[in-house]
């Protein structure tokens, strides 16, 4: 077996679930600059995570959307912007069609005036 493969700097660390504030103390090699005072009165490094067994739908039995980073909001904003852009393009296309129709009508009326004046 290879020597020095596994880390040997395990220490007690507090993990905090950002969804519901659930905290638990365990051994880990994770690095952290933050510290928190635990229930036993000692101070331990704090590692913040987005999801734990306390908030994961598999463990809680609930189906819900976990949107920590605003992905759903970003998607909805992009969809709304796309819809607005599509409506704007459609409005400008209608304007162009109206201008083209008016131009064609004007050209027809000029052509009619020119043919009637020749007669």
Image (spheres, helix red, strand yellow):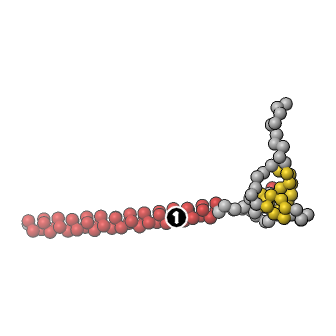
Query: Residue 3's quadrant in the figure?
Result: top right
Q: Residues within 10 Å of mark 1 (few under 14, many from 20)?
A: few
- Furthest residue in direction left, as rendered: 119
Element type at mark 1: helix
Q: Position of residue 41 (x, y in %)?
A: 89, 65
> Which of these two is toward me, 17 or 39?
39
> Which of these two is toward me, 84 or 31?
31
Is 83 on the left or on the right of 110, as rendered? right
Query: Residue 113's quadrant in the figure?
Result: bottom left
Q: From the viewer's perspective, is residue 3 above or below residue 91?
A: above
- Furthest residue in direction top, as rendered: 1
Residue at 13% of width from left, 66% of height from top? 114
> Which of these two is toward me, 107 or 44?
44
Residue at 88% of width from left, 62% of height from top? 42
Is 15 on the left or on the right of 100, as rendered? right
Q: Position of residue 116 (x, y in %)?
A: 12, 68
Quarter of the picture holding the N terminus: top right
What is the number of callouts on the image? Answer: 1
Quarter of the picture holding the C terminus: bottom left
- Furthest residue in direction right, as rendered: 40
> Which of these two is toward me, 98 or 109?
98
Q: From the viewer's perspective, is residue 13 above or below residue 7?
A: below
Residue at 54% of width from left, 65% of height from top? 80
Q: Position of residue 73 (x, y in %)?
A: 62, 64
Q: Position of residue 118 (x, y in %)?
A: 8, 65
Q: In this orientation, does residue 105 appear? A: yes
Q: In this orientation, does residue 57 appear? A: no
Q: Which residue is mark 1?
A: 81
């Amino acid at each position: 077996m290879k020597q020095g493969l596994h880390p040997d700097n395990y220490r007690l660390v507090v993990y905090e679930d950002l969804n519901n504030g659930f905290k638990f103390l365990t051994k880990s090699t994770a690095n952290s600059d933050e510290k928190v005072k635990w229930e036993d009165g000692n101070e331990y490094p704090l590692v913040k995570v987005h999801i734990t067994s306390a908030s994961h739908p598999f463990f809680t039995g609930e189906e819900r959307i976990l949107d920590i980073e605003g992905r759903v909001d970003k998607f909805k904003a992009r969809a709304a912007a796309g819809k607005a852009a599509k409506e704007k393009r459609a409005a400008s296309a209608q304007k162009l069609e109206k201008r083209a129709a008016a131009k064609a009508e004007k050209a027809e009326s000029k052509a009619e005036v020119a043919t009637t004046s020749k007669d």
